């Protein structure tokens, strides 16, 4: 399945990488070009145990990251996690 994930924060990046690991064709887009450049090199911009290995494994044609991307069949609406005071 072709999936586009908008945003590469904690929610978007982890979901995108996991969906790519499951065999889906994933495109992650983000407006922060610094993040995009790091992710294209397989360098995670957040810490999540195991994320770096999965990102490096899946950063290729099935997980391109960019600021302008072709839209997939499914675009999940991801919200940031709740912030507790």
Image (cartoon, rainbow, N blue to C red):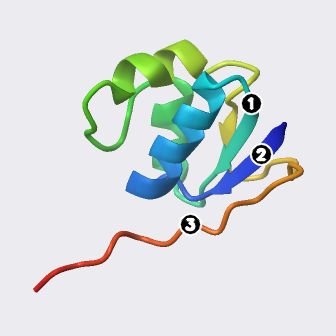
Q: Secondary structure at mark 2?
A: strand
Callout 1–callout 3 Cβ contact below 8 Å: no
Q: For the point 31% across and 44% down, which residue is it?
A: 46
Task: Identify the residue at horizontal 48%, vertical 17% (top origin).
Answer: 56
The residue at which mark 1 appears reads as 24
Q: Is residue 33 shown left or right of residue 47?
A: right
Q: Report if the CB atoms under discs 2 and 3 are less than 8 Å apart.
A: no
Secondary structure found at label 3 = loop
Percent x, y for residue 22?
Answer: 63, 25
Q: Bin the neighbour count of mark 2 within 10 Å (Cα to Cα): few under 14, some 14-19, many 20 and up.
A: many
Mark 2 or 3, nearer chain start: 2
| Quadrant in which the C terminus appears | bottom left
Q: Earlier in the sequence, mark 2 or mark 1?
A: 2
Q: Position of residue 38 (x, y in %)?
A: 45, 34
Q: Nearer the viewer, residue 9 or 25?
A: 25
Asked if disc 2 and disc 1 are in contact, CB closer than 8 Å, the reply is yes
According to the image, label 3 marks what residue? 78
Q: Which residue is more in the foreground, 71 or 11?
A: 11
Few, some or many residues within 10 Å of mark 1 (<14, 14–19, 20+):
some
For the point 74% across and 30% down, the residue is 24
Q: Which of these two is toward me, 81 or 44?
A: 81
Instruction: Give the Cα separation between the discs numbered 1 and 3.
Output: 17 Å
19 to 13, vertically: above or below: above
Q: Earlier in the sequence, mark 1 or mark 3?
A: 1
How much space separates mark 2 and mark 3, taking CA atoms? 13 Å
Residue 27 position within the rendered picture, expressed as x and y whole percent measured from the top left: 72, 41
Counting from the top left corner in percent of width and height, residue 6 is at: 64, 59
Q: Which residue is mark 2?
A: 3
Tag 1 secondary structure? loop
20 shown above or below 10 = above
For the N terminus, give its image quadrant.
top right
């Amino acid at each position: 399945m072709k999936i586009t994930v908008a945003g590469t924060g904690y929610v978007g990046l982890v979901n995108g990488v996991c969906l790519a690991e499951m065999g889906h064709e994933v495109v992650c887009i983000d407006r922060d070009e610094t993040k995009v450049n790091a992710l294209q090199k397989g360098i995670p911009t957040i810490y999540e145990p195991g994320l770096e290995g999965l990102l490096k494994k899946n950063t290729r044609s099935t997980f391109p990251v960019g600021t302008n991307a072709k839209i997939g069949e499914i675009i999940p609406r991801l919200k940031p996690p709740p912030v507790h005071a």
